[in-house]
Image: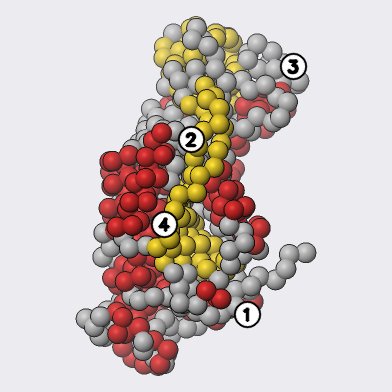
């Protein structure tokens, strides 16, 4: 089940006309216009949404704009690795697309960043069971050189086992870290098992390892390794760091468990190509009352290089942009809605950090981000001031027809809005997407257009359009209490 569209009386009238009547509509009248079953549902929520919000939601459920953006970016640009010429082409594409869609104040805000690019990659067991393994380099991996390196594998079932290894015990060896990442709806397994990638290589390097391979931070059983960034602390010399596909990691585990020393040959030849230009593409739907503070909505334009970045994160850019476009079509909102198609998220949040610094003087009220694929939204979380509770209640009520429940934990926002949220102490709303299959595809060659489910994508657009329309037309004070 993806969504339930509410039939609303008067939906054939132009949205602009209906808009002027919103404030006059009492809740009683709104509920009367809705079919019996739905009214029963809404009677349990604190507040029903005005009928024009429901009409907007209905329209957004027919959306084609989000899919058009994902299709266009993946077809006409493809992989868009941060700092490369492809990411620059993607920025030009974004500017042209946002112009065509009718947004204002469109600009590219460049910044410089250190850039790492992939080289050759190969892993093969030399003995006792010679065969190739599917491997990919992690971002910031060092190079083995063209000739590669061959060494004995030291197996660690978990990251904690690697952490417990004695200093110096890995000298000249290839550490192999496995784990048991499973799919979870809320994506929390990435927090639990992702550190094998985030910090495993740094820990192995500090213990003297010549190189490291990890079981990919992923949940599929295809022969696709998952890339992604890893980070080495200042003062730690980076080592070659690769991810094995999950079936290959399982194969290597079985070899190790047979008890004979396993020799692995690894060839990874990535390069650091120094400071390169990246940039943020920004566009706006100007509001009628700038004193209210704007809503910044973000996605990231860069992608990893193995796939075409459909779910990570062309879909996010499609969702936020299509939603803003539907709000635009319904008439000018009170608050400005600013779109941030951030650059260089994958390799260290360069775009989000640049935005948080360059734009902290702008009057913001709320931040939101879409960066968890294209599957349906199932939960809404809020981080709003206590006084804005009626607003949160109204939003939660309006999202119920889309099958979205209300979470109990505070919203935290995505990676690209972290800096502006921190710098400006912003209110946040999170529309949490179903992440059950996200880590089957994340950072793999399989992150391609055919994995997008157009119906679920539309449900996302409808959820976003609902929230943007309600907050965009609300003059509720969203100032967060000062942090201690
Ligand atoms: Zn992402
Ligand atoms: Zn990513």
Q: Which residue is mark 2?
A: 83
Label 1 vs label 3: CA separation?
Answer: 56 Å
Up-down: is 108 above or below 322? above
| Marks 3, 2: nearer the viewer | 2
Up-down: is 36 above or below 2? below
Residue density around tag 3, few if under 14, some if 14–19, many if 20 or more, within 10 Å: few
- Mark positioned earlier in the residue sequence (3 or 4): 4
| Marks 1, 2: nearer the viewer | 2
- Mark positioned earlier in the residue sequence (1 or 3): 3
Between 37 and 380, the one lying in front of the other is: 380
- Mark positioned earlier in the residue sequence (1 or 2): 2
Up-down: is 182 above or below 176? below
- Residue 77 numbered tag: none
Task: Kindly indicate whether the residue at mark 2 contacts the one at mark 3 (C-beta within 8 angstroms).
Answer: no
Its colouring scheme is: secondary structure
- Residue 147 position in % (x across, y down): 50, 7
Task: State the residue at coordinates (50%, 77%).
Answer: 289
Q: Which residue is mark 4?
A: 106
Q: Which residue is mark 1?
A: 387
Q: Specify whether tag 2 is near ligand 2 (CB below 8 Å).
A: no
- Residue 377 position in % (x across, y down): 42, 60
Q: Please tell me whether mark 1 sits on a helix, a strand or a loop.
A: helix
- Mark positioned earlier in the residue sequence (4 or 1): 4
Label 1 vs label 2: CA separation?
Answer: 43 Å
- Mark positioned earlier in the residue sequence (4 or 2): 2
- Residue 466 position in % (x across, y down): 40, 71
Q: Please tell me whether mark 4 sits on a helix, a strand or a loop.
A: strand
Label 3 vs label 2: CA separation?
Answer: 36 Å
Label 3 vs label 4: CA separation?
Answer: 53 Å
């Amino acid at each position: 089940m993806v969504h339930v569209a509410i039939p609303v009386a008067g939906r054939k009238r132009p949205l602009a006309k209906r808009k002027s009547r919103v404030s006059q509509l009492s809740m009683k009248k709104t509920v009367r216009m809705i079919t019996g079953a739905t009214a029963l549902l809404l009677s349990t929520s604190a507040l029903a949404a005005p009928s024009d919000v429901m009409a907007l939601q209905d329209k957004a459920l027919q959306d084609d704009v989000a899919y058009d953006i994902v299709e266009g970016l993946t077809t006409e640009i493809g992989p868009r690795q941060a700092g490369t010429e492809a990411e620059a082409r993607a920025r030009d594409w974004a500017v042209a697309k946002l112009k065509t869609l009718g947004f204002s104040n469109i600009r590219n805000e460049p910044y410089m960043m250190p850039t790492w690019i992939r080289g050759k990659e190969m892993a093969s067991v030399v003995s006792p069971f010679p065969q190739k393994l599917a491997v990919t380099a992690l971002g910031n991996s060092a190079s083995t050189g063209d000739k590669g390196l061959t060494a004995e594998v030291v197996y660690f079932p978990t990251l904690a086992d690697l952490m417990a290894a004695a200093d110096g015990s890995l000298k000249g060896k290839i550490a192999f870290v496995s784990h048991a990442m499973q799919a979870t709806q809320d994506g929390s397994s990435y927090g639990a098992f992702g550190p094998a990638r985030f910090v495993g290589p740094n820990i192995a390097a500090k213990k003297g390892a010549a190189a490291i391979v990890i079981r990919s931070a992923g949940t599929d059983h295809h022969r696709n390794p998952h890339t992604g960034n890893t980070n080495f602390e200042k003062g730690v010399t980076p080592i070659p760091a690769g991810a094995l596909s999950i079936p290959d990691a399982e194969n290597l585990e079985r070899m190790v468990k047979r008890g004979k020393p396993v020799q692995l040959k690894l060839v990874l030849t990535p390069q650091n190509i120094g400071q390169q230009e990246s940039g943020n593409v920004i566009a706006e739907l100007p509001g009628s009352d700038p004193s209210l503070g704007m809503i910044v909505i973000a996605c990231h334009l860069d992608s990893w290089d193995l796939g075409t970045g459909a779910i990570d994160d062309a879909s996010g850019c499609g969702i936020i942009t299509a939603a803003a476009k539907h709000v635009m079509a319904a008439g000018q909102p009170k608050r400005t809605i600013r779109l941030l198609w951030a650059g260089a998220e994958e390799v260290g949040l360069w775009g989000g950090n640049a935005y948080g610094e360059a734009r902290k003087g702008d009057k913001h009220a709320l931040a939101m981000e879409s960066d968890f694929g294209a599957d349906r939204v199932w939960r809404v979380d809020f981080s709003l001031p206590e006084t804005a509770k009626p607003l949160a209640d109204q939003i939660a009520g309006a999202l119920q027809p889309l099958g979205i429940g209300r979470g109990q934990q505070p919203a935290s926002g995505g990676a690209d809005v972290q800096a502006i949220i921190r710098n400006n102490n912003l209110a946040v709303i999170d529309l949490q997407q179903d992440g059950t299959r996200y880590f089957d595809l994340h950072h793999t060659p399989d992150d391609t257009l055919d994995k997008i489910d157009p119906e679920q994508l539309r449900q996302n657009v409808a959820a976003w359009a609902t929230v943007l329309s309600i907050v965009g037309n609300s003059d509720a004070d969203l100032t967060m209490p000062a942090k201690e």
